[in-house]
Every structure is written in C-alpha cells, then in structure tokens.
Image (cartoon, rainbow, N blue to C red):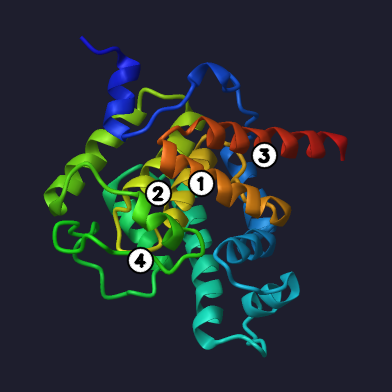
Amino acid sequence: MPSLEDALFDALGFRWDRSRLPKIVPALSVDLACFKLHKSLSQFVWEATLLEGLSFTFSEVQTLLDGVTVAGHSIANQAQVLRLATCTKRLLAMVRGGQFKLTQSVFAELHRLVSERRSQVSRAFRDEQNQPNSTSNLAVEPRLAALTSSMLVGTEGMDRLFNEGVAALKTCSSFERAVGFYLFGSLHRFFDGENQLTSRFMMNGVLLSRGVEAISIPTADIERFTEIVRRFHQSKDGSEMMLFLAGLCAGRTSRDNAG
C-alpha cells in the first residue's frame, strides 16, 4: 500500500524532499500581510512585469497605476501591467473577505483577470485533447511548453487531475501547499496561457490567507528563478524551488527585523 507521501506525489505528478524544508515559515496576521502587499503594490506589479518579460521601469509602472499612459510601450503591454494590478487587488479582496480557496472557480477567475483571452469564461480548463500544443505568451512558459504534459487529457481529465491534486495538497503544511500548487499549476498547464502567472497568484493567496507575506521574485533573482523553473519541468523534482522560495521568505524576514 503506498504511503501518504507517495500518494501526494502521485496525485501531483512531481515530488520534493520534505525533510529539507523549514518547519515554520514566519507569519503575521492576515490583515497585516494583506496591508503590506497593498502598500507595496507598485513594487509587486513591477517585479511581476519583469518576470513576464515586459521592460517597464518602476516609475513607469507607478505612472500607469496612477492612471496615466507612458510613452514607448505598446497598448497591449500597458494593458498587461494594469491586469496584473487588477488581479492583485482582487486577490487581496478575496483573502480579506475570507473568499480565497484552492478551487477551480477561484483559479479561473484570477486567470481571466490576467488573460488577454477574456472570452474564456464558460470553461475553466483547456481541453488538452483538442489543443495538445497550446503554449503561453509568458516569458518563461514558451520555453517550457515542449517539456510539459498532463497525465490526463480532455477537460474531464483536467478537472479530475485538478481536484485530486488539490485534495492531496490538503495534507501539506501551508507553505508546501502554496508552493506545491504553484508547481502543480505550472507543470500541468490547466489553461491555454498564463499558467505560471495565475499559479503564482494562487500560491500567494494561500500564503496571505495564513498571514504569510506574498512572495515576489526580486529583479536580481529572475534569471535564477527561471532556471530553477526550467530544471523543475525537466526533473519533476520541486525541492530546489521549495528551498529557493523558502529562502526568499527567510531573507525578507531578516531584512524586516534589521529595519
């Protein structure tokens, strides 16, 4: 009979070394964690735009969020920055209102907020059987699309894969559940695009709901992060990503304490 850990990893389609993770991730109150993200909204959105391959400066992002267009950028790219801000605000509202859950409906709503394909409102997940070569317009995902494949095909299979994966993650600590869902959504590409992006929002929803500050990838770490993502999709071993993101949490806490 398989162990609970084997059942977890089988449901997700990847594994990680649970013994190497910190037992406790520093947490605040939910209100304070949400307040800190709200206060740093421009920084959070700016770092997300860079991770998505959009070359905006921090000042340009601030200007856009103030409702003023900026020169030298396409309308489409400026719209993407605004979608990132809208999705962040919606995530905060969900968490503050106790509405955030690891459900298909929440996942789909956040995806619609960041997606250019606004017509995709009736069905949360793509039909892999009919669209086997679907790729994303994100900076990271196109390079990974050829390396990833779901264990099941068709929308019913994707629904079942999602439900079984989320059920398995309920046995994990909050941090493992958050990062595990990010890796799960990234690996199986439930949507036609914006999978990594939407899965990171879901990750942060789990963290914020437990009073843990949202994770953003600092500009200096983007190249390293992208490489870790690439290795994960090749090896199906999430240990390196788990440790990297745990390190970001620890480093942030150390800086806060020093301040």
Which callout, 3 or 4, points at the residue further toward the start of the chain? 4
Residue bearing mark 3: 248
Residue type, numbered disc 4: Arg
Q: Tell me: 128 left or right of 34.
A: left
The reply, left or right, for residue 104 in relation to residue 199 is left
Q: Is residue 55 above or below residue 20?
A: below
Query: For the residue marked with disc 1, what is the amino acid?
Result: Val
Of residues 12 and 214, which is closer to you in this image? 12
The single residue placed furthest to the right in the displayed view is 259
Residue 229: numbered disc: 1
- Residue 186, which numbered label? 2
Q: Earlier in the sequence, mark 2 or mark 1?
A: 2
Q: Give the image location of residue 193, x and y in percent.
A: 36, 64
Using residue 174 as the reference point, say whether residue 133 is left or right of it. left
Q: CA distance from mark 3 to mark 2?
A: 19 Å
| Residue shown at the point (46%, 26%) measured from the top left | 16
Q: Helix, strand or loop at disc 4?
A: helix
| Neighbourhood count class around disc 3 (C-alpha, 10 Å): few under 14, some 14–19, many 20 upward | some
Tell me the distance, in whole angstroms, between the alpha carbons under discs 1 and 3. 15 Å
Residue at mark 4: 112
Q: Nearer the viewer, mark 2 or mark 4?
A: 2
**Mark 4 or mark 1: which is in front?**
1
Residue 243 appears at what percent x and percent y? 59, 31
